[in-house]
Image (cartoon, helix red, strand yellow):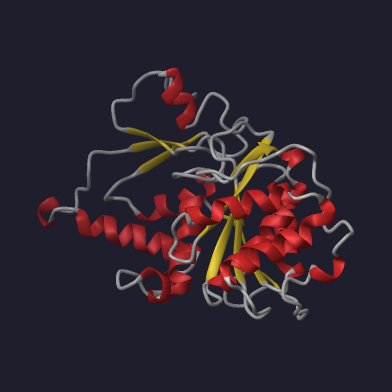
Amino acid sequence: LDSTNPNRTLHTTTIGARTLLCSAAGRMIGPPHPGVPLAYGTAGFRARADLLDSTFFRMGALAVLRSRSRGGLAVGLMVTASHNAEPDNGIKLVDPDGGMLDVSWEPHASAVANAADADLAAALDAVADAVGVVSAGGGRVLVARDTRPHSERLSALALDGVSHLGGAGEDFGLLTTPQLHHIVRHANGGAAGGAHVGPAAWASEGGYAEMLCTAFAALLPPDLGGGGLRAPLTVDCACGVGGPQLAPIAQRLPPLLPLELINRPGEGELNAGCGAEFVQKGRLPPRGLDTPPPTTSADSGGGGGGGGGG
């Protein structure tokens, strides 16, 4: 464990070949490919969880190359399928500035994910050549996951891929997608995010809560008189990671904005009858909110990892 952050586990290796997998050309590396083609898009890769073992391992390796292509700046890997049903999972890369993976890297991700098992080393070498990575040094990857029952195992496979390319992986455990984007951005500071980046201390789960709560308080009119806003705000957590991650923020916001959290983990199946996808497509309130409340309500986005919940 990292002594500065008990929720973060460090994964490192001292092996240092250019892609480390070159010496293994011609034999299988990592979990076997499932034989189903996958394409990287705006949401990264998404599929049934039992099809993704090789993809997670390979994206761990690709993330090291992405970090090295940016001089060793940290990148992120988010393990989530957001609003998808619980049997699904997915993985997406976070760029050093805290944004989505640069679109020019999406073909690299698809090529590596779909390479034949015996050709994986060559596929990674091709990416390294295309982006100008010539050194085996560096490579920092921050990994976080949602609450799906298979996310921890898949996250470990991604960290294995990081180690196999000689990178340094850091396991941040349970986070929402916005939290990981925030942590990656602040871990790199002005080197990736430019002038408008908060203090380095914000590169943590607690730092995310601090930023959000102080910014919200600063937005309120000075003549509010301590009475706060119309409340409570009911938040549908979609039975996912938004519940535990929003709870500390909910403790800090009153009296400015009391929050009432419904559909927390353990209160039902992930995204079943709740979550933004269900509400938007069905034009129905989430379960637990069958009639419009007398106060305001909000949806977390997706229980898996994006928005407030997934």
Residue at the (62%, 78%) spot, across then down: 138
- Classify residue 28 as left or right of residue 155: right
Q: Which residue reaches farthest right?
A: 27
x then y, percent, for residue 270:
60, 33
Q: Nearer the viewer, residue 236 or 51?
A: 51
Residue 150, picture quadrant: top right
Residue at the (64%, 68%) spot, across then down: 128
- Classify residue 99 as left or right of residue 162: left
Asked if one can make out residue 135 in the rendered structure from this viewpoint, the answer is yes
x then y, percent, for residue 253:
33, 53
x then y, percent, for residue 200:
42, 75
Above or below: residue 217 compared with residue 133: above
Asked if one can make out residue 8 in the rendered structure from this viewpoint, the answer is no
Q: How many marks?
A: 0
Residue at the (77%, 57%) spot, across then down: 120
Q: Nearer the viewer, residue 185 or 145?
A: 185
Q: Nearer the viewer, residue 230 or 242?
A: 242
Image quadrant holding the N terminus, namely bottom right
Q: Which residue reaches farthest left?
A: 223
Residue 112, picture quadrant: bottom right
x then y, percent, for residue 122:
76, 61
